[in-house]
Image (tube, rainbow, N blue to C red):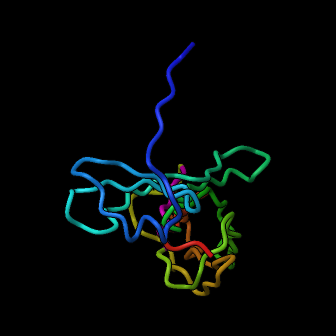
C-alpha cells in the first residue's frame, strides 16, 4: 500500500492568520491555492497555481486559457484576417473589468515584418474588437493573447 502525505490546510481566512514554520507549505481549501511560510510572516506567501485550463482544439475554435488560484488568467487563440474590417474576438474566460492587456501578433505568408495592426478599438469583459490595415501587407491571420483578472 502506498503512503499518503498531507499538508496542513484551512480556508483562506484561516491561512491568513496562520504563521507557519520556516519552509512549511499549507493549502487553502476554498481557493485550492498553496502558501509557503518563513516562520515569521503571518499568512505566508501565495504560490499561484493553475486551477483550470483549456487546450486549443477545433471544438473550441483553437482558443486556450490558464486560470490561476489568484484569479489571474492568461488566454489566447488565432483569429483570421478580416480584410481590414472589424474582427471580434470572444474570450473563453470572462474578465473582471477592461483593464486587461491585449497582445496581437500577425503571422502568415503575406507578413513581411511590419506591424500592420490598427489595434484594439473596443474592449469589454467578454470580447474585444481589432482592425487590420487592409493593405497587401496584411497578415493572413494572427495570434492574440489577453492577460488580466478573471471575473
Q: Is residue 72 above or below residue 48?
A: below
What residue is rendered at 58% in x and 72% in y?
A: 150
Magenta stretch in the rendered image: 102-108
Is residue 142 in view from this perspective?
A: no
Q: Quadrant of the C terminus?
A: bottom right
Image quadrant containing the N terminus: top right
Q: Is residue 43 left or right of residue 62?
A: left
* Residue at 34 percent of width and 67 percent of height: 43
Q: Residue at x 55, y 63 (%)?
A: 144
Q: Is residue 132 above or below residue 50?
A: below
In depth, the one of 132 and 103 nearer the eye is 103
Q: Residue furthest top?
A: 1
- The image shows residue 139 at horizontal and vertical percentages of 55, 60
Q: Is residue 40 above or below residue 86?
A: above
Q: Is residue 30 magenta?
A: no
Looking at the picture, how far across and down is residue 122, in whole percent? 61, 87
Left or right of 45? Residue 79 is right
Q: Is residue 106 magenta?
A: yes
In the depicted structure, whether residue 146 falls above or below residue 20: below
Amino acid at each position: 500500500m502506498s503512503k499518503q502525505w498531507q499538508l496542513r490546510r484551512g480556508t483562506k481566512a484561516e491561512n491568513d492568520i496562520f504563521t507557519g514554520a520556516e519552509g512549511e507549505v499549507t493549502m487553502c481549501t476554498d481557493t485550492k491555492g498553496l502558501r509557503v511560510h518563513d516562520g515569521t510572516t503571518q499568512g505566508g506567501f501565495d504560490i499561484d497555481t493553475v486551477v483550470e485550463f483549456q487546450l486549443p482544439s477545433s471544438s473550441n475554435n483553437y482558443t486556450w486559457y490558464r486560470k490561476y488560484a489568484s484569479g489571474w488568467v492568461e488566454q489566447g487563440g488565432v483569429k483570421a484576417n478580416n480584410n481590414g474590417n472589424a474582427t471580434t474576438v470572444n474570450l473563453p474566460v470572462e474578465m473582471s473589468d477592461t483593464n486587461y492587456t491585449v497582445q496581437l501578433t500577425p503571422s502568415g505568408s503575406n507578413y513581411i515584418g511590419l506591424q500592420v495592426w490598427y489595434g484594439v478599438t473596443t474592449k469589454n469583459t467578454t470580447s474585444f474588437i481589432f482592425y487590420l490595415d487592409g493593405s497587401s501587407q496584411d497578415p493572413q491571420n494572427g495570434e492574440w493573447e489577453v492577460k488580466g483578472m478573471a471575473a
